[in-house]
Image (tube, grey):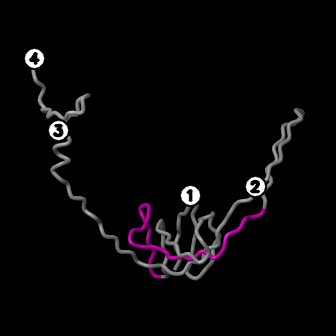
């Protein structure tokens, strides 16, 4: 089974029991993580596309190691001006092993509204700190 996963603005095509190099995640070696932003899954029988993400599916993974990539050299130059700048950059990465795909059950929590919220909308606090009731209709003078 394959899945297209989004992480830190990049997309990765992952498979079960394989290792991938992700941008630095933080966390300790051996720590379990879950990837929830899944864009696409491909089983040999069916393909599933999310809009934008697939609900109810998560991928469990384990952090194997941290490291730094090879140096990328950036050289800027303007001809005939004597301007030359040479900079280097090494990107941090995390090696991750994809363990398994699992279905997720999400429970929605319903927030209860109280009568205190309704009275707070109708009341107005004056500069002296006293609360006064206001009417929604304008009073004429």
Q: Are marks 1 and 3 in contact (CB under 8 Å)?
A: no
Residue 9: assigned label:
1
| For marks 1 and 2 on the same chain, the one whose residue lies earlier in the sequence | 1
Disc 1 versus disc 3: nearer the observer: 3
| For marks 1 and 3 on the same chain, the one whose residue lies earlier in the sequence | 1
For the residue carrying disc 1, how many other residues have a C-alpha within 10 Å: few (<14), some (14-19), or many (20+)? few
> Disc 3 marks which residue?
122
Residue 69: assigned label:
none
Compute the Cα span from label 4 to label 3.
21 Å
Q: Nearer the viewer, residue 5 or 26?
A: 26
Under circle 3, the secondary element is helix
Compute the Cα span from label 4 to label 1.
59 Å
Disc 4 versus disc 1: nearer the observer: 4
For the residue carrying disc 4, how many other residues have a C-alpha within 10 Å: few (<14), some (14-19), or many (20+)? few
> Disc 4 marks which residue?
141
Q: Position of residue 115 (x, y in %)?
A: 15, 50
Residue 11 appears left or right of 90: left
Q: Position of residue 16 (x, y in %)?
A: 55, 81
| For marks 4 and 1 on the same chain, the one whose residue lies earlier in the sequence | 1
């Amino acid at each position: 089974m394959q899945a297209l996963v989004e992480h830190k603005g990049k997309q990765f095509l992952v498979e079960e029991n394989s290792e991938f190099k992700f941008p630095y995640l933080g966390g300790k070696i051996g720590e379990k993580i879950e990837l929830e932003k899944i864009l696409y899954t491909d089983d040999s029988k069916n393909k599933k596309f999310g809009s934008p993400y697939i609900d109810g599916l998560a991928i469990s993974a384990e952090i194997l190691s941290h490291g730094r990539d090879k140096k990328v050299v950036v050289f800027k130059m303007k001809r005939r001006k004597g301007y030359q700048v040479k900079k280097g950059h090494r990107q941090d990465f995390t090696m991750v092993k994809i363990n398994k795909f699992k279905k997720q059950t999400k429970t929605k929590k319903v927030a209860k509204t109280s009568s205190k919220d309704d009275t707070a909308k109708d009341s107005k606090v004056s500069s002296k700190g006293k609360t006064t009731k206001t009417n929604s209709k304008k009073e004429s003078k």
